[in-house]
Each structure stands twice: as structure tokens, then as C-alpha cells.
Amino acid sequence: MQNRCAVTLGLIIFSVMLRELSAQESPKANSVVTAGLDDLAQTSPSVTTGPIIEIMALDADGMNLRNVASIPNYPIINSPEVSPDGEWIGVDGWKHGEALTDAHLLLVHLKTGIVSDLGLGAMPTWSADGRWIAYSRYGGGESPRGVFIGRVNQEQQRLIDENGWGITWSPDGQTLAYVKGGDLILYDVRSGTRQEVFGKGQSPYRRIMHNPEWSPDSRRICIIGRRANGNSEFATVSAEGDGADLQVCCDAEGFNPDIGWSKDGQRLTFPGVPTEKGPGQLWVYDFEAKGEPTLLIGQPTDRNNLGNDWSPDGRTLYFVTVK
């Protein structure tokens, strides 16, 4: 029964992820959400008394699986991102009954479990010095929609693009990348200049999914791109401004767009979609071996294992999982 509950909640979370994609497809804030999380939970156990999301950690060699944090007041969390000093994890979270537009930016301190709520926002990523967060906001009401950067101390906030989505900060801190329709926009932090990766009318994708991921050397970005025929694929593109240099990795059908990139640059990690047959699991794509993704060794096989991110030293993979 517990596993069945976990699978059901995993399907709810996957529905939230699909709504994140629909949010990026429309530039109008009042059309982003038509239903709240309560509408998705009518046939599921209560997320306030049943399964909640935990953050777990696994050593790079697949050993030492352990629980590191949970946020009981936010039973649904997604998109974990580890701070540059390795002490905090940023996530987006929802309380039971909230609409998608109510997503909050939450920072969890790994040693103490202290949670800092930065207010409305989703899919946080850190600046290289750990002082700023880049994030997306669904909009609605008086809250503007788009992609932003803000100080962790909440003293400053700046809108980057009201029509952007899924913004992410390069590890070297020099560039922001965000989704805009079927293209990625590169935003130079110092100069404020913008550049399309593919160029107007040149993208092979109808849509690029949220949560793109930078390579550790800040030279490439991994995406899930959806072609005009509906097929989805993992691919990497150049972030160096000399053309897209599209390199397709593997098929992305049945996988979620929350990508981790190992710090040695050799592997991608990403979650599979949970189904009624069983929970979603984390998978690995090896750039050297190529071929089909393989299951991540050492993960719990009786849980839905979702969004993930690697520690700055590359020794630990953090991921969210349904208890």
C-alpha cells in the first residue's frame, strides 16, 4: 500500500512538471494555471498526512545512501540545486491545496535542517559566489511572470525577461541561460547582452523543456528538446556563442526534465517518469559509452526518485524522493 501511495504522489508531481512546461508555452500570466494541486490530489492520499518528499544523498560510487533533509510544511518539492559552498540546497515547494503559481523558493541548510523561504519563485539556481539566485516565477495577481535574479538576502530583485522560463546560472557565474519558446537565450551577466543559441527560425525544436543543465566547465548546456513530430531527446548545445553545435545524446521519452551533470563531465543523471507499474527511478547517460541510459546504482528502488543535482566537489548526488 505504501508503495502504491508513493507512485500515486509521484504521478501528481509529474503532473506539476507538465504544468511547468505549459507555463513556459504561454507569455500571459493569467493563463498559466487553471487548476491547483488539490485538483490533482482528489484520488490520492493526503499529502499532509501521507507520503512527503525527502532529500536523499548518495556517494558517487553508489554507496552510503542516506536521508539529509525534508520539509514537512511543503509536501511537494522539486528542482534541487546545491549551493557553491555545498551547505545549502535550493528547491521550489508547494503547500497542500496551493495553485502552481504559489510555488516558493526554499533554501534548506544541510547540517541544521533550517529552511529559509525566499518567497514566490521556482527552479532556483545559484550564482558562483552563492549570493544570488536565478529563478522563474509563474505570475498571477500582482506578481509578475518571467525569469529573475535576486539576492539571497532578499534585498534586491531584477526581472531578466518576462517571456523567459527555466533560467539557470553557469558554474563560472558569467552567463545565464533560459528557455524562450524553441530556443535558449544566453544572457551575459556583466554586459546585459543577449544571444540566441540557435537563432530566429533555426531551432530544430518546437519546445525546449524547463530545467536545462550546464556542463561543469560552463561550455555547454544539456536540454530536453521536443521536435515538431512530438519526439523528445536529450541533447547538448554550445554556450560559447559560436553556433549551437547541437549534439544529440539519447531519446528522452519517459524521462523528466530535471538533469544533473556529474562534475567530471562524463555523465548525465535524470529521473524517469513514474507509472502505475512502479516508481520513477534515476537513470545515467554516459558520454563515453553512449548508447541507452542505465539505472543509477545504489538508489532506493521502492521510491519515486525525482530531481537531482551533484555537490560542487562531485562526490555526492542529491535527489528528491517520495517517502
Image (spheres, rainbow, N blue to C red):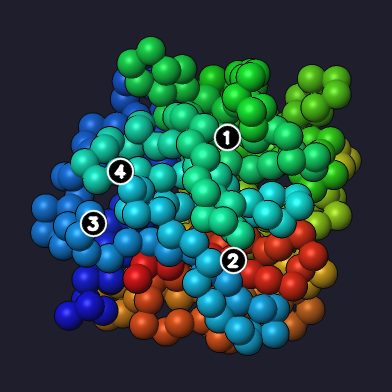
Query: Dot 3 corresponds to which residue?
Result: 47
Residue 77 visible within the image: yes
The residue carrying pointer 1 sits among few (fewer than 14), some (14 to 19) or many (20 or more) residues within 10 Å by Cα, namely: many
Q: Position of residue 190 (x, y in %)?
A: 85, 24
Q: Marks 2/4: CA distance?
A: 22 Å
In the visual, does 59 lie left or right of 21?
A: right
First-in-chain label (3 vs 2): 3
Instruction: Name the element at disc 2.
Output: strand
Looking at the image, which residue is at 80% across and 57% down? 216
First-in-chain label (2 vs 1): 1
Under mark 1, the amino acid is Tyr
Looking at the image, which residue is at 11% across and 53% down? 42
Query: Dot 1 corresponds to which residue?
Result: 135
Q: Please report contact status of discs 4 and 1: CB closer than 8 Å, yes or no.
A: no
Under mark 3, the amino acid is Val
Nearest to the eye among marks 1 and 3: give it: 3
Query: Dot 2 corresponds to which residue?
Result: 318
Q: Please report contact status of discs 1 and 3: CB closer than 8 Å, yes or no.
A: no
Front residue of 283 and 47: 47
Q: Position of residue 182 (x, y in %)?
A: 57, 39
Nearest to the eye among marks 2 and 1: give it: 2
| Circle on res. 95 | 4
The residue carrying pointer 2 sits among few (fewer than 14), some (14 to 19) or many (20 or more) residues within 10 Å by Cα, namely: many
Front residue of 107 and 146: 107
Q: Please report contact status of discs 2 and 1: CB closer than 8 Å, yes or no.
A: no
Pick the quarter of the image with the C terminus.
Answer: bottom left
Number of numbered discs: 4
The residue carrying pointer 4 sits among few (fewer than 14), some (14 to 19) or many (20 or more) residues within 10 Å by Cα, namely: some
Q: Marks 2/1: CA distance?
A: 19 Å
